[in-house]
């Protein structure tokens, strides 16, 4: 008998995801799918329906949920009032040339900020609404560049907290970029930087290095669940990953319309399509 694969890992660009995931599900595979799921809610729903019909799991690579940082942040913030979330990333134009096109990669909020947004959904709670404005000031006119190079988003969380995301591709190659995520809560400040988490309280500061690369942690959790037949230990199901996708697509829509966008309404639209 010819062997049949049990798992497909899809790491292609977003416009390829739907066709390839449907083919994998049709072949009887569970799927580990690179984020973002797709660039439209309609395609994300198509994948979800196909996974349910095939009785297979589609696990989206929101790997930072499986990090030590996410675990520590969620624990530190449990039961505390959160006031402010602030995310920033300064970097050069993407190494992956496909992400120079917003039609191919979705822009920096969809392509990258989806990670800290999902981290915050895990540690703080859902985002209710967003207001976003993007610009293309520095890289405009660069050959093959068809994207925004600066992004500013305001978030309102269901718990009452507010947040901001500021990202840019405008740093020159080799220039001083950087990343940070700060969560200010009642008697607690959580600071996430590459490879470590810092938690500050009135009693002092504690630092937690990342003992395992989060992508490896997600894959390990996936295959442990596959071996046991129990998918409960996964930190995110497909529908929850769709909610994270809706949050970043809401930012893109807000930029297009110039108006705030409620994430719940975008989810309802996707469910009707």
Image (cartoon, rainbow, N blue to C red):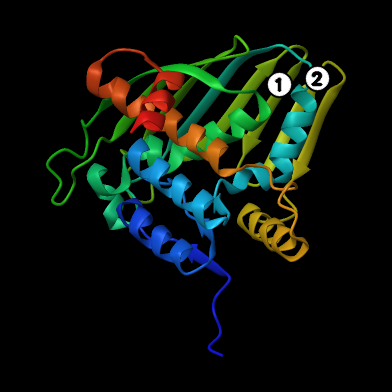
Task: Inspect this view and state whether residue 177 appears.
Answer: no
Determine if residue 111 is in view: yes
When the figure is inspected, residue 137 is found, relative to residue 49, above or below; the finding is: above
- Sequence-earlier tag: 1 or 2: 1
The residue lying at 79 percent from left, 30 percent from top is: 75
| Quarter of the view holding residue 263 | top left
| Percent of width and height locating residue 199 | 76, 28
Q: Are marks 1 and 2 in contact (CB under 8 Å)?
A: yes
Which residue is farthest front?
53
- In the rendered image, the vertical position of residue 138 relative to residue 34, given as above or below: above
| Quadrant hosting residue 194 | top right
Q: Quadrant of residue 215?
A: bottom right
In the depicted view, which residue is nearer to us: 23 or 52? 52
Question: x and y percent of residue 252 in the render?
Answer: 32, 28
Image quarter in which the C terminus is found: top left
> Residue 111, percent across and down?
39, 43
Q: Which residue is mark 2?
A: 201
Residue 22 got which mark? none
Query: Residue at left 69%, top 26%?
Result: 190
Left or right side of 259 for 49: right
Instruction: Give the Cα distance between marks 1 and 2.
Output: 7 Å
- Mark 2: give few (<14), some (14-19) or many (20+) Cα within 10 Å: some
Residue projecting furthest to the bottom: 1
Task: Name the residue at 73% across, 30% down.
Answer: 74
Give SS at disc 1.
strand
Residue at horizontal 87%, vertical 19%?
A: 203
User: Which circle marks residue 189 in the picture?
Assistant: 1
Could you say whether the residue bearing mark 2 is in a helix, strand or loop? strand
């Amino acid at each position: 008998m010819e062997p049949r694969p049990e798992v497909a890992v899809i790491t292609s660009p977003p416009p390829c995801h739907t066709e390839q995931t449907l083919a994998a599900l049709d072949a009887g595979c569970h799927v580990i799918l690179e984020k973002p799921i797709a660039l439209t809610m309609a395609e994300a729903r198509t994948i979800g329906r196909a996974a349910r019909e095939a009785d297979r799991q589609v696990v989206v690579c929101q790997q930072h949920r499986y990090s030590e940082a996410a675990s520590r942040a969620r624990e530190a913030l449990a039961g505390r009032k959160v006031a402010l979330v602030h995310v920033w990333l300064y970097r050069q134009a993407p190494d992956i040339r496909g992400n120079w096109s917003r039609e191919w990669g979705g822009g920096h909020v969809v392509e990258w900020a989806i990670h800290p947004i999902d981290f915050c959904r895990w540690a703080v709670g859902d985002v209710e609404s967003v207001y976003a404005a993007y610009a293309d000031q520095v890289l405009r006119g660069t050959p093959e560049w068809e994207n925004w190079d600066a992004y500013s988003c305001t978030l309102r969380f269901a718990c009452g907290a507010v947040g901001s995301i500021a990202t840019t591709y405008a740093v020159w190659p080799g220039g001083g970029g950087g990343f940070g995520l700060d969560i200010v809560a009642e008697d607690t400040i959580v600071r996430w930087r590459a490879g470590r988490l810092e938690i500050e309280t009135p009693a002092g500061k504690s630092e937690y290095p990342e003992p395992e690369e989060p992508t490896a942690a997600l894959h390990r959790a996936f295959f442990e669940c596959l071996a046991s037949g129990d998918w409960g230990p996964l930190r995110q199901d497909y529908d929850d990953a769709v909610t994270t996708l809706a949050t970043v697509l809401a930012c893109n829509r807000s930029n297009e319309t110039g108006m705030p966008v409620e994430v719940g309404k975008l989810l309802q639209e996707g469910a009707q399509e």
